[in-house]
Image: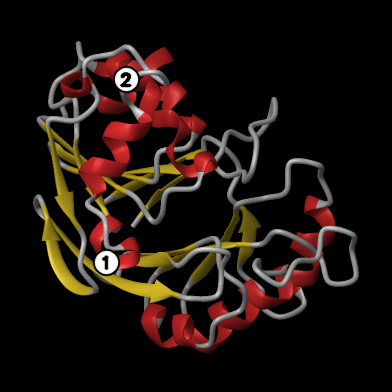
C-alpha cells in the first residue's frame, strides 16, 4: 500500500495545509480517507489517481473541514474509477442515513452539481470489521469530540484517529499498526488547548501504548504552533513527524 497525505490540517485550509484528506492505494484500487480540502490536489494533478479503476471514500464524521472537499468531486469525473463510492457513519453515529446528510450538503441551495457526479453510490459504515471495496477496514466510535467520530484501521498498515480527545481505547485499537496518523491540535498549556481535541503528548501516548512503528501528526492547528506540538510528541515517542501535505509512505 502507498499512503499520500493530501491534507494534514484542521478547521480551515492554509497555504501549507489543506484540511484532512489522505489517499491509500493498492494496485488499481484506492480509498480516500475523509474529504477535506486536500481533494483539490487530486483535481489539480490527476497523476495520483493514474491507473485507479475503483475509488472509495470513507468519512470519519461530517464536520465541514472533513467534508468540504466533496464539492470538488465533480472535477474528478474524467479520471478512471471516479466518482467514488462514499462510505459514511450517518446511521451509526446520528441515526440518519449518510446519503440523506450528503444530499443536503450537495444539493440546492448549497450546490447545483448533479449528486451523481460526486458519488457513484453511498454506503453505511458500521462499527467493527467490514469490507470497503477491496480494503479491509475496522472502525471504532470515538465519543469524546463535540459529535461522535470514527477511528479507522486498514489492516496492520494504517490506523487513523482524528477529532478526538485522548482516548485510551485507541491504543488498543491501533495496536501493532505500522503507521498511526493521529490528531495533534495543540501543545499542552497553549491557548489552543481544548477538551475535545488531542495534544501532541496525547498522540504520543497513544502511539507508544499501541506499539506502532511510526506516528504522523495530523489535524494541525491553522494558526501554527506545530513545532511545539512536534517537540511535545517527541518527548513521548521517538519516531514521529508532522504529516505535511504531500507526505508519502509505503506501508
Displayed quadrant of residue 99: top left
Colour treatment of the image: secondary structure
Q: Is residue 247 left or right of residue 100?
A: right
Q: Is residue 72 left or right of residue 218?
A: left
Residue behind mark 1? 92
Secondary structure beneath disc 2?
Answer: helix
Residue at x-position 90% and y-position 59%: 191
Residue at x-position 32% and y-position 13%: 75
> Quadrant location of the C terminus?
bottom left
Q: Position of residue 150 (x, y in %)?
A: 39, 65
Q: Nearer the viewer, residue 165 or 45?
A: 165
Q: Position of residue 93 (x, y in %)?
A: 34, 65
Front of the two marks 2 and 1: 1
User: Is residue 45 positioned above or below 104 on the image?
Assistant: above
Displayed quadrant of residue 103: top left
Q: Is residue 147 left or right of residue 83?
A: right
Residue at x-position 58% and y-position 33%: 18
Residue at x-position 54% and y-position 82%: 167
Q: For mark 1, does the 10 Å Cα neighbourhood hold few (<14), some (14 to 19), or many (20 or more) residues?
A: some
Q: Residue furthest front?
A: 109
Residue behind mark 2? 47
- The alpha-carbon separation of the residues under discs 2 and 1 comes to 34 Å
Q: For mark 2, does the 10 Å Cα neighbourhood hold few (<14), some (14 to 19), or many (20 or more) residues?
A: few
Q: Is residue 61 left or right of residue 14?
A: left
Q: Is residue 17 visible?
A: yes
Displayed quadrant of residue 186: bottom right
Identify the mark nearer the N-term, 2 or 1.
2
Secondary structure beneath disc 1?
Answer: helix
Q: Is residue 31 visible?
A: no
User: Is residue 234 positioned above or below 90 on the image?
Assistant: below
Q: Nearer the viewer, residue 92 or 138?
A: 92
Amino acid at each position: 500500500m502507498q499512503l499520500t497525505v493530501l491534507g494534514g490540517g484542521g478547521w480551515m485550509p492554509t497555504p501549507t495545509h489543506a484540511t484532512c484528506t489522505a489517499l491509500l492505494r493498492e494496485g488499481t484500487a484506492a480509498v480516500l480517507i475523509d474529504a477535506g480540502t486536500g481533494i483539490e490536489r487530486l483535481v489539480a494533478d490527476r497523476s495520483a489517481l493514474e491507473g485507479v479503476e475503483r475509488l472509495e471514500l470513507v468519512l470519519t464524521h461530517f464536520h465541514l473541514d472533513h467534508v468540504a472537499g466533496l464539492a470538488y468531486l465533480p472535477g474528478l469525473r474524467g479520471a478512471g474509477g471516479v466518482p467514488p463510492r462514499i462510505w459514511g457513519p450517518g446511521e451509526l453515529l446520528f441515526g440518519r442515513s449518510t446519503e440523506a446528510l450528503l444530499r443536503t450538503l450537495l444539493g440546492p441551495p448549497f450546490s447545483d452539481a448533479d449528486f451523481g457526479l460526486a458519488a457513484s453510490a453511498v454506503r453505511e459504515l458500521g462499527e467493527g470489521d467490514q469490507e470497503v471495496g477491496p480494503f479491509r477496514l475496522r472502525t471504532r466510535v470515538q465519543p469524546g469530540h463535540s459529535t461522535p467520530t470514527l477511528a479507522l484501521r486498514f489492516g496492520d498498515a494504517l490506523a487513523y484517529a482524528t477529532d478526538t480527545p485522548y482516548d485510551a481505547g485507541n491504543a488498543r485499537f491501533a495496536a501493532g499498526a505500522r503507521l498511526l496518523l493521529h490528531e495533534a491540535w495543540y501543545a499542552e498549556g497553549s491557548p489552543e488547548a481544548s477538551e475535545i481535541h488531542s495534544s501532541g503528548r496525547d498522540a504520543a501516548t497513544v502511539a507508544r501504548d499501541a506499539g506502532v512503528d511510526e506516528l504522523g501528526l495530523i489535524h494541525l492547528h491553522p494558526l501554527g504552533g506545530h513545532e511545539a506540538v512536534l517537540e511535545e510528541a517527541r518527548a513521548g515517542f521517538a519516531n514521529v513527524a508532522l504529516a505535511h501535505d504531500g507526505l508519502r509512505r509505503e506501508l
